[in-house]
Every structure is written in structure tokens, then in C-alpha cells.
Image: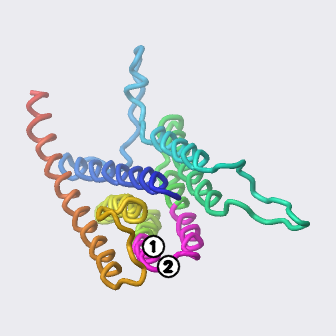
Amino acid sequence: MGGFEGHLFPGLSLFLYGLYHAALLSRAVICNSPVQYPPHRPWSKGRWARLRQMYYIGFLKILSSCILVAQELNSIQWQLILITKKYHLRNFMYRKQWQHLTLYMSFFLSGCVDVVSQNLLSKRCAVLEQGAQALSMYLFLPLMVSHMQDTEGVELQIHMLFMQAMFLLTLVGTVELWAPNVLLIWMLKAFLYIVTGSWLIQIGFMLYKPISGYKWLDDDKNDLAFATTFFCWHVAFSAFLMISTYGFSILWYRYLRAGADA
């Protein structure tokens, strides 16, 4: 996730995925239906019936992962290699790029599991989907810890705040494996996905395209304090977005859609 695009695209993917979960949660509360894992719909006959009855979230995960991999490979000026031999030494090369690609591949595998479970199996296996999703979070944490080894000042501060949100998301994903039908768990997961996604986008702007036009100063206590303040604003914004999603869902399911069905 190096460079502005390397923070923007992954952050946007996490943010939109959080909105997707928030919409599913709102629909479940309003319509009293299953939340994230509704029962598999029976296949009907017809030319386009099968396409209309497919679940597309897994395909979108795969597509976004491929876009992130392509963006990462495009950022490398030379050939991507793992080990180079120079002066009778063998050195690991492109450590951060390999970390990014490992993370993206975990999301890709999660998308593949979603596609198989939602569209190919005779009975949807929600536990398998949740496990693959939790596995990608488990890989995220150690990769980010290693990723921050050569950072300091403001960059270290904003990545530590990102790690806090990611740790809570991993914890919620783990609890979901044992308590898959708890409404609070679903709400926290959607909320934390939105927080991590929006904050990752903010990191890209703070490091590479600051609003003031000037680079953040690592030895300025005001900059460090404002970094934490901005994170708190993102948390509040995510909560407001969750409430707004629920309000729009009420308008859609109880009035607009009900009127159209009538």
C-alpha cells in the first residue's frame, strides 16, 4: 500500500464493503430477515434467471483484489523478484510489495470462498465464509506490524491508530465465528470496516496529498495531536454514516419499495 493510490484503493474497498454490511444489517432489522447470510435462493428456469439469482459480493472481492494487485505491480519499476544474488549474498527484495501482495491474495481467496459457498454449493456454508474473512484479518495484523518498523512521527501515529481499528475488527471477526447470530457483532463489524476504510483513505491524503499543501512535521506536537483528532472525527463520521444508512433503508423498504409493490 505504498503511495497515494496504494492507500486510496484498499481503503475504498474496505469502506464500500463496510457500507454493504451496514445495508444488510439495516435490511435485516427493518424486514426481520437474516442479516449477512440469507438462505440460498432456489434456482429457477429461464435465460437470465440464474444470473439474477447469483450473489455477486464474492465476485466483487475477486475483482477488487485483482485491481489492487495490478496497481501494486504497476508501481514497481523493475522486475518483481523475491531473492537477489549480489556479491555472493542472497537478499530479500521488495519486502513491502510482497507484504501487500500477500494481503491482497488473502482477500482474493476470501472472495473465491464466497463465490463457491454462495453460488456453487447446494447449501450455503456461512462458517466457511466467516473463517476465510477472519483469516484475511489475521494476516493483516502481523503484516502491518512489520510494515511500521521503519516509520516514525506522524506516519507512525496514524498507522498505530489504523492498527487499533484493525485489531478490533479482527477481534469482532473472531467472536463472530462463535456467535454468528448476535446483532451487536454484525453492527460492530460494519462500523469497523467503515472506520478502517475511511481512515486508510485519510492516511493516503495525509502522507502524500495534505490539504494544507505542506508536509506534516514529525517533531510538531500539534500535528501529532491533530492526527488523533482526525481519527476521532472519522469514528464519528462512521457512526453518522451507519445511522444515515439505517434511515435511508427505512425510507426505501417501508415507503418507496412498499409503494412500488402496491
Q: Position of residue 40 (x, y in %)?
A: 41, 38
Secondary structure at badge 1 equals helix
Residue at 29% x, 48% y is: 24
Q: Quadrant of residue 74?
A: top right
Q: What quarter of the picture does the C terminus occupy?
A: top left
Left or right position of 135 against 195 = right
Magenta segment boundaries in residue numbering: 137-164
Does the residue at mark 2 contact the one at mark 1 (Cβ under 8 Å)? yes
User: Is residue 180 in view from this perspective?
Assistant: no
User: Is residue 136 in view from this perspective?
Assistant: yes
Q: Tell me the number on the disc at residue 152.
A: 2
Q: Tell me the number on the disc at residue 111.
A: none
Left or right position of 50 against 235 = right
Residue 52 on the magenta segment: no
Looking at the rendered structure, the kind of residue marked 1 is Glu
Read off the residue under disc 1: 155
**What colouring method underlies this structural image?**
rainbow
Left or right position of 104 against 36 = right
72, 171: nearer the viewer: 72
Q: Position of residue 54 (x, y in %)?
A: 42, 31
Q: Position of residue 224 (x, y in %)?
A: 35, 80
Looking at the rendered structure, the kind of residue marked 2 is Glu
Q: Position of residue 188 (x, y in %)?
A: 32, 65
